[in-house]
Image (cartoon, rainbow, N blue to C red):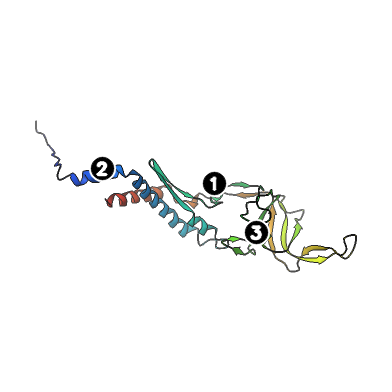
């Protein structure tokens, strides 16, 4: 019987053994490198497919800046933490609840309707302004033929004195002539799922592998 023997020279393989040992001890560093690769892939995908689409409220720029990497001894996660991005990804319905504004007179209070801004509402600090930031607003009821989920509208308003009746002399708010439609008030908004917000699974896997190989090559 002819045998083919392969002898491993401990001295010649020492460098490889040291690298393998270091990698085994630095598992968390490997996970971090893989997660960094995935994060870069997600950001690149957003730049190519979403950032140019909607500059009005800078939403996708905030999504781009909201990536978060967490690493532990058992793995790593990459998350998009911007409020609203999960709703865009999974889809769903939104109903009035507590006012989510970070500031303002009704912060944290129950709301009766959702105020959906129009393109006429300016952007302040990366977000379209809330109604309380828009000065005097007048309320218009929806037409009877309108979508039943629409309650009414907020438009530019102006204060005018009441000239007749028991409230004569008091001020009231009426729509401003030539004023803009600023907000549509709705009982619910419905959002379709957009699974293209994240790159395909295959791209993410390749990005993780590239990160791992770069990390291994650094030893």
- Please report whichever mark, 2 or 1, sits nearer to the chain's N-terminal start: 2
Mark drawn on residue 21: 2
Circle 2 residues within 10 Å: few <14, some 14–19, many ≥20: few
Mark closer to the chain start, 3 or 1: 1
Which element type, helix, strand or loop, lies under badge 3? loop
Nearest the camera: 86 or 76? 76
Residue at (69%, 51%) from the top-left corner? 113
Q: Are marks 2 and 1 in contact (CB under 8 Å)?
A: no
Find numbered disc 1 in the image and state the secondary structure of the residue it sits on: helix
Give the x, y percent position of residue 50. 50, 58
Label 1 neighbour load within 10 Å: few <14, some 14-19, many 20+: few
Q: Above or below — where is 56 with respect to 22? A: below
Q: CA distance from mark 2 to mark 1?
A: 42 Å
**Is the C-beta separation of discs 3 and 2 under 8 Å?**
no
Tag shown at residue 90: 1
Q: In the image, what residue occupies the spot 51% across and 55% down? A: 63
C-alpha distance separating marks 3 and 1: 25 Å
Is residue 108 or residue 75 the one in the foreground?
A: 108
- In the image: residue 191, left or right of residue 13: right
Identify which residue is drawn at 29% across, 49% down.
Answer: 216
Observer-side mark, 2 or 1, equals 2
Number of numbered callouts drawn: 3
According to the image, label 3 marks what residue?
130
Alpha carbons under labels 3 and 2: distance apart: 57 Å
Looking at the image, which residue sits at the far bottom?
A: 178
């Amino acid at each position: 019987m002819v045998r083919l023997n392969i002898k491993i020279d401990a001295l010649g393989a020492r460098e490889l053994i040291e690298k393998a040992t270091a990698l085994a001890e630095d598992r968390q560093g490997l996970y971090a490198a893989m997660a960094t690769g995935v994060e870069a892939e997600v950001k690149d995908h957003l730049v190519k497919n979403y950032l140019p689409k909607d500059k009005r409220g800078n939403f996708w720029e905030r999504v781009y800046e909201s990536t978060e990497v967490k690493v532990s001894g058992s793995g790593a996660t990459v998350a998009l933490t911007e409020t609203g991005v999960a709703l865009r990804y999974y889809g769903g319905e939104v109903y009035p609840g507590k006012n989510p504004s970070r500031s303002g007179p009704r912060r944290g209070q129950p709301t009766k309707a959702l105020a959906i801004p129009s393109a006429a509402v300016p952007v302040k600090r990366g977000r379209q302004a809330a109604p309380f930031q828009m000065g005097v607003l007048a309320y218009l009821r929806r037409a009877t033929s309108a979508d039943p989920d629409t309650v009414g509208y907020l438009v530019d308003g102006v204060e005018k004195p009441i000239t007749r009746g028991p409230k004569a002399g008091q001020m009231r708010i009426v729509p401003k002539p030539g004023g803009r439609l600023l907000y549509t008030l709705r009982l619910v908004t419905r959002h379709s799922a957009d699974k293209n917000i994240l790159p395909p699974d295959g791209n993410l896997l390749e990005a993780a592998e590239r990160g791992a190989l770069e990390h291994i090559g650094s030893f």
